[in-house]
Image (cartoon, rainbow, N blue to C red):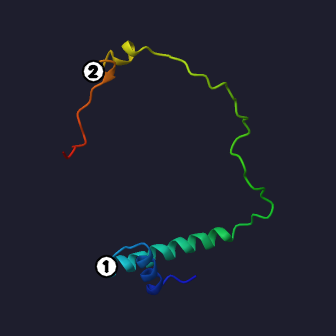
Amino acid sequence: MKIDKSLILKLEDLSRLHLSEEEREAMILDLSNMLNLVEKLEELPTQKVEPLIYINHEINKWRKDEAANLITNENALINAPETHENFFSVPRVIKLNK
């Protein structure tokens, strides 16, 4: 595959980008370098290499999914700068239009 200006213009249109001429030239160079790297990787002898399915041979250790209260509300709120009843109180970040 050849990376040229027409391909960059097509990609620019598909991705809704507006590149300058310098950015297009840089993109051509970068994509060409990436393709050259992939072509180099294709030269590696991989005929006797088995496909890697899992990185390690560990088996999942399942446990029962049971709800449990590990901390009380009192302990959870003890270091909070501000609270309101049994909740954390934080500054408003969304303004409501009324």
Q: Looking at the rendering, which quadrant does residue 42 occupy?
A: bottom right
Residue 9 pos. (x, y %):
42, 82
Residue 62 pos. (x, y %):
69, 29
Q: Looking at the rendering, which quadrant does residue 78 occupy?
A: top left
Residue drawn at x 72%, y 52% is: 52
Q: Which mark is residue 83?
A: 2
Residue 50 pos. (x, y %):
78, 56
Amino acid bearing label 1? Ser
Judge the density around disc 2: few (<14), some (14-19), many (≥20) Cα neighbours within 10 Å: few
The span from disc 2 to disc 1 (Cα, nearest Å) is 52 Å
Residue drawn at x 74%, y 66% is: 45
Residue 32 pos. (x, y %):
50, 77
Q: Which mark is residue 20?
A: 1
Q: Nearest the camera: 86 or 62?
A: 86
Q: In this figure, what is the number of numbered marks? A: 2
Residue, far front? 98
Vertical relation: 63 (above or below) 57: above
Closer to us: mark 2 or mark 1?
Answer: 2
Residue, far left? 98
Q: Is residue 91 left or right of residue 78?
A: left
Is the N terminus in the top left, top right, bottom left or bottom right quadrant?
bottom right
